[in-house]
Image (tube, helix red, strand yellow):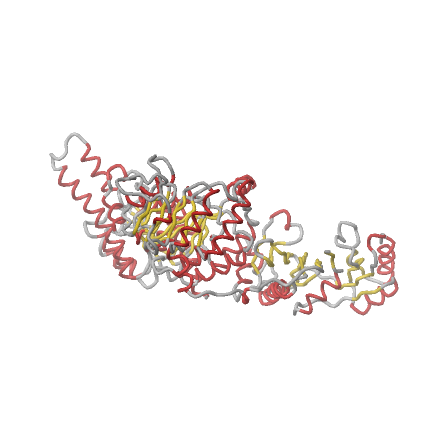
Amino acid sequence: MAHTLSEHESKRLLAEYGVAIADERLVSGAYAAADAARDLGVPVALKLCGRGIAHKTERNLVRLSLTGDEAVTRAAKELLAAKTDDDREADLLVCPMVSGRRELIVGLIRDPQFGPCVMLGLGGIFAELLSDVAFAVAPLGSNDAEGLMAALEHRDILDAFRGEPAVDRAMLTTLLDALGRIGTERPDVLSIDINPLIISGGVPVVVDALVELDEKSTPAMSHAARPQRCGDEIRARLDPLFHPKGIIVTGVSSHPGKFGTVAYHNIIACGYEGNLFAINREGAEIFERPSFKSIEDVPDGAADLAVVCTPAKINEQFLRQAAAKGVRAAFIASAGYGESQDGEEMQIRLVALADELGMAVAGPNGQGVISTKSKLCAQIVAPYPPAGNISVVSQSGNIASSYMNYACVGGVGISKAVSCGNAAQLELADYIEYYAADPDTAVSLVYLEGVGDDGARFLDVARAHTRTKPLVLVRGGVTSAGKSAASSHTGSLASDENIFAGVCRQAGISRAGTVEEAYEIAASFAAQPLPRGARTLIFTVAGGWGVLTADACVHNGLELIPVPQDLKRRIDKMVPSRWSRSNPIDLAGGETRDTIPEVIDMITAHDDVDAVIYLGMGIQAAQAHLFKSGPFYPDHGIGRIADFHDNQDRRYATAAAEAARTHGKPVLVATDLAITDRDYGNPGTVALREAGYPVFPSGHRAIGTLAHMVRYARFRSRI
């Protein structure tokens, strides 16, 4: 049974947790109110106060700026006369008047997935108009309160403002931390609403507060009480899924369109070298290999992974047989489980059986699992990506395919990938936890539609992951239409967008808006060093590209630094004086054969530079292609100049990769000509991809990725 405390009781609860509350008086009569006003000093505010009164302003139960006994007494009588039977017991609350030109709103809510969440936002009339709010899951860490302030779109309001001092951030931090402690220590507190929090002379003052309680609540497991597993335990559970010594595939037939047959083919075609057993009820030869009529015919201990592509109603029998043969993990591609109403009970039984057998089960209703180190392609679709150190987990099979497709063309490959389907037993958090402990994973790439019932565990494993490795995420189901699709697709609804944004900020997750952006960010994390700061130099061979990229640099919060004087002097000796002499560095066509590689190395090495964006590679190779496809090639000297152009672009690409490696700084290469190179293999972009570096199709895409890298580097430095 939920009920609200009165404003006075709500403030007393806050005071118990160290929140500064202005002196006020709770009285029962009009003349007592006048006495209290004299004690506090006029002007005062007068309110009708009781547990049944939640919305005083809407009912006109507040009187402001009262300045004498007569005014206070008259207002008190009016308020008492306005009391209704629904208000039950109500008294008068006499408060000092607080004035300020800025108002905030702070509070606490209990999210069904993430638990207690602290909120900070613009208050007063702007609360609903702008909806500028930020959330953080309680308890707040050492930097979470500051993170809430930084997350506000209009955060400048916290600074010195129109002659008023900046907000006392220490006091605001104390208030936010107190709300977090209440959320974790008092499970009976459902919500807290402090609106407005008036900024008076820089001091945040609690003017109104409302606490909602639930008397039936029970304490939840705290983060500290959660069992923690070591890396060896985590790897031991899922290694059979990603590094199996042998695989049993069910549902294999002579028809190449059947899922079991496709999975069996892909495992063979991609070079898996372990034991492989196809289950076909006729025992037919499939792809020139013998099959087995039953799992019971498979040698004991020869396989530890089952890829299950048979109808849901017979899979429980197969799992028991597989477990008896030593199988410790299964990927279930079969549909007909929790994604449909008729299959919910079967999915519950599936999880119970997996737990009983001690088997890690991925899926059901999933697309497959990839592990390039083991040459494993146990999935029912293409592609099979090149080997690399990005690991993928996706709540959508085709988004997993999208990530792998980008790896095929992007130059930075994949270590592991799994589509978790309905995530009946193994959830998204389990894979993130495994990738954090996996030595072959440098960065994790995630597609998510919902975190399930245990959002706190998702936050825990994400935080553990980002302490040592980047985690890049795209979330679907943000809009109402998207949420509806997500519900029908995975059976899970996404958490509130503002709360999820707070979770990503707290955990140091790099959240992308699109699949393309997510791959580019992950590939850059995998291939490039982390920046030491935000000081960025743009080096361009074309003015317009440099201008647009400079704009993007500023819009993304990076520091577009002036060109250091010693760099200016060195470049002056290399090219004519018409070069830009500013950031972006544009040599204005004055470069010679060796200038661009030398400048790339020089600016990357400089102590005042944290990151470099190099623009324009591909121009020469594009012209070389046009020369070679024209009617005069290779005569008239065209063959020689075409080769020169190709070699130069390859040199520029090599110089960028070498500068990043040598100086331990990111050098992000962008060219708006990258799309056309796929028709003929532009030597510059090809060279970068061969070296394992991503190439960006525009300067603003490179800047967006660099901004993510800077934010993550700052996150890592704080922890």
Q: Is residue 436 above or below residue 590?
A: below
What percent of the width, then of the height, locates residue 528? Answer: 33, 56
What percent of the width, then of the height, locates residue 518? Answer: 41, 48
In the image, 478 versus 129, the foreground residue is 478
Quarter of the image containing the N terminus?
bottom right
Q: In the rendered image, is residue 582 in sight?
A: no
The image quarter containing residue 707 is bottom left
The number of discs equals 0
Left or right of 344 in this view: 432: left
What percent of the width, then of the height, locates residue 546? Answer: 35, 47
Q: Is residue 232 above or below residue 333?
A: below
- The residue shown at (36%, 57%) is 441
Residue lying at the far top of the rendered structure = 631
Q: In the rendered image, is residue 331 in sight?
A: yes
In the image, 248 versus 568, the foreground residue is 248
Left or right of 255 in this view: 169: right
In the image, 208 versus 221, the foreground residue is 221
What percent of the width, then of the height, locates residue 408? Answer: 31, 44
The image quarter containing residue 291 is top left
